[in-house]
Amino acid sequence: KCQSTAEGVCLRLLISFLSADVDECAEALDNCSMDAICQNTLKSYKCICKSGYKGDGKHCEDIDECASEYNGGCVHECINIPGNYRCTCYDGFRLAHDGHNCLDVDECAEGNGGCQQICVNMMGSYECRCRDGFLLSDNQHTCIQRPKDVPTCMDKNHGCAHICRETPKGSIACECRPGFQLTKNSRDCKLTCNYGNGGCQHICEEMDHGPRCSCHMKFALHSDGKTCVETCAVNNGGCDSTCHDAVAGVRCSCPVGFTLQLDRKTCKDIDECRMNNGGCDHVCRNTVGSFECSCKKGYKLLTNERTCQVNAEAETCKLNICSICVLTASVFPCCHQPSDGTHIDECSINRGGCKFGCVNTLGSYECTCPPGYKLHWNKKDCIETVKCTSSLVAPKATLTCSKTGKKESCSLTCASKAHYLSESDNSYSVSCGIPILRGKSQSRLNASSIQSCIETQAPPVKQTVSFRIKNAKCYLHPKHKGRAEDNGRQIGPGGQPCNNCLVTFVNLKCDSSKKAKGRRARNPSSKEVTRITLELEAEVKPGDATGNCNIMCQRQRMEQQMKSYIKALKKSINQERFLIRVAGLEYEVAQKLPQAALRQENCGPGREKDSVRCLPGSYYHGEQERCVQCPPGTFQEREGQLACDLCPGGDRHGPLGARNISSCAGQCPPGYFSSDGFKPCQPCPLGAYQPDPGRTLCFPCGGGLGTKKEGASSFNDCEVKVLCSPGHYYNTSVHRCIRCPHGTYQAEFRQNYCISCPGNTTTDFDGAISVSQCKNRECGGEIGEFIGYIESPNYPGNYPANVECIWTINPPHKRKILIVVPEIFLPSEDECGDVLVMRKNGSATSITTYETCQTYERPIAFTSRSRRLWINFKSNDVNSARGFQIPYVTYDEDYEQLVEDIVRDGRLYASENHQEILKDKKLIKTLFDVLAHPNNYYKYSTRDSTEMLPRSFIRLIHSKVSAFLRPYK
């Protein structure tokens, strides 16, 4: 019992307690039939019989589809099963793809039908025949040669149509094959409906002269009197669009913007945007049966609806009908719409296919890995940081030096993973191979694009050394051919690189600067000093240790070898005999100043003329001085590189100009996996599937479910115990179809997940079957002192259920409100369940300016009956519609008589041209601009008016303005 001042608190607690909804379906508190679906509602629940059943939901009985007059649509036999039915065919026929029609089986196509010589296929059956000189034996399949002196039945003129029998008296008796009847002449055989359905495709009826064929009600009998063909008169011939009757049945065709599918029935929308971007300059958006072009910020679409032009009108944003309007860095204002349902939360779809974690981002998503693992090149799987797969072994750099006389020659060969970076006009760096990462990532490398791989736990041998070259400039350029001093250079012993010359990683940096620093230089200002810094890494493999030389001994040997190479390197660089070999070309690292001055016309490595960097998927060819596409079997993710990286496997197959490793050929197809995602691949085992190419694992079906065979590529291949319809997902724990929860949807059959609604949208109820049911519940609009608009939630999509919006328009002093309703869509079948009302304030008794609960596609304009407006929109939980987008303007009260005279004149709405003006956002914006600020009238010329507005509208406004101004002359 509530007493004294606590009554209000008690009452609110009681209401809150009573309003707490219990999900009876989830708590198994419902009494729905096992053949029904339980749907939770506010304060209660509903029981709905499943498809194939009828009843009130608490008691459901099976519908016998076969008992209907058209036999469930089956042309032969219909078998009723709980909640469904299935069609079967007579012997000699097979079930068509539609599951209802029956087609003839060509027995002769397989093993000649068992006939020894000639097989003849017929509708629903077949028969064997023999060549001349042979006769068919009693088994009706083999042939025996006809002897010359033979008994009566061996005579070819014995007269029996099928089988000849000799009687004890020496005469003959004729018999027929099974399914045939002997005629009155005791020789011929008459076909019956018991054999091959009498030669009829559908229905066979016994008549005196033999079988008579007819067809199921959805088909028509062909001119051959046996075959049944579809007709446009019944169910449009099964065509999605236009149906044409033809001799062989029906022929389907599709309207413009659609293409006929392989079933020759279904029409599929053509995605025009896939071909040359639909001809659009900027953005192409495919629509059903057509497409639309749009432009980027700061541009506008021309009348050809394809070309985009810079928007030179520095218009204000005050009446741009959009949710957020900002001024960009340019001079043009831009409208930014909120989430319109196009952004999908990919992480809600089977965790984005990620092996470990998934993070949703705007327009995309990223997979994450736990500590000790890194992201695989396919951006989804996780592999151990210390693990090195067979086909992704880190490429090595080859450093070789040789001596010819007193000349030292050294070269650095980069088979793959060569990366060039131009830091300035005076410096650059080239790296070759991949460093051994031990705990810390290298800042100079992009970890997302390089597959680092550790083969040894022993720390590498590292050396860093710097050399100076006087009077030279850093300039990586192809070596000039035909230099005499290079003719005697050797690569190594025997002309081949030696094995102990391999290093894990080399990074060369060249930097040129003035020699003088802080004090007056002795040398002229043109003198420059070039410094070359080399970082070398070489690995020490524990497997190379022997009894005579352990791992420490091996390490010392490697250090001594690297020191000797560093000495040779210093000499070769000073003698300008050091080369870098990349992509089959040899490059020199620096150039003497007189020669360097001649290179002004060249843009430098990695750039074409006009200083354009070579794009990903291409590399800079030093001799040709241009960008070249990566050849098949290679790829390049970065800009301005000197070579392309090798694809795993090295089979030299793949597309031209590949931009990343995922474009390389030889990836494991869906349903298969391998340790690195490339061939050789293994099929997913039974009970697992894999929908993506290039993966290192398969996903288990879960719940002990199996698959019919190995190599499954979808959850649809998992042998579930029940098939889930759209709006549901299969729960592998309870092996039931569960309705997609609130805020998610599923548009397909047989899925094991639901998709989260994009952005800040959600669904009205559970069990949503389309992304269109995801709705934004925020009330739209922009309220300004002079111009603005109100907008129903989720506009132009259907507004959500049980939503309420309140807007308040409070204009400045001595200003009135004019409102234009271009169109409004509210469901009329709800008995005013969804209402839009405009009043002076929130009181139901206050002055009302406008109220509606119906759809009006004709525009209307009116002035507010009160100085300020309180606008309220409510929707119930039944139906929904598009809603509205209503602009308004506040104007000087001195023009009140003029404005009211215009909006109350029926001629404003009588013409369709006038109605289109009130629906045109750009024209309304212009008119409101003048009405809110009359001085802006002078911004528009007479030509602007005649181009934008029809003459009848101009005459109407002119007459009103003239009458209004007549007293003032």
Image (cartoon, rainbow, N blue to C red):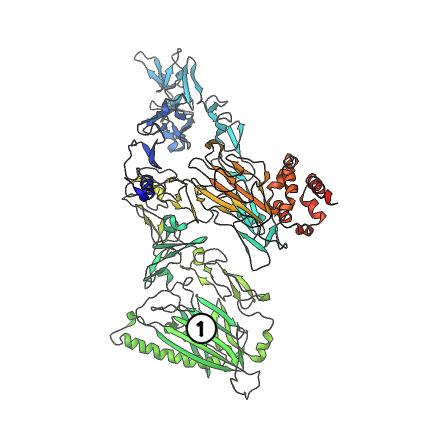
Which quadrant of the view contains residue 128?
top left
Label 1, secondary structure: give it: strand
Q: Is residue 897 left or right of residue 53?
A: right
Q: Is residue 583 above or below residue 382?
A: below
Residue at 51% from the left image edge and 34% from the top image edge: 854
Residue extending farthest left: 547
Which quadrant of the view contains residue 153?
top left
Residue extending farthest right: 969
Q: Is residue 424 above or below residue 278?
A: below
Residue extending farthest front: 4
**Amino acid type for the residue under numbered disc 1:** Leu
Q: Nearer the viewer, residue 619 or 938?
A: 938
- Quarter of the image for the N terminus: give it: top left
Residue at 24% from the left image edge and 74% from the top image edge: 547
Q: Nearer the viewer, residue 781 or 30?
A: 781
- How many tags in the picture? 1
- Quarter of the image for the C terminus: give it: top right
Q: Is residue 494 left or right of residue 869?
A: left
Q: Is residue 609 left or right of residue 487?
A: right
Q: Nearer the viewer, residue 894 or 33?
A: 894
Q: Is residue 433 above or below residue 964?
A: below
User: How many other residues sit within 10 Å of disc 1, few (<14), some (14-19) or many (≥20)?
Assistant: many
Which quadrant of the view contains residue 30?
top left
Q: Position of residue 838 (x, y in %)?
A: 52, 40
Q: Position of residue 411 (x, y in %)?
A: 45, 74
Residue at 42% from the left image edge and 37% from the top image edge: 877
The residue that disc 1 covers is 412
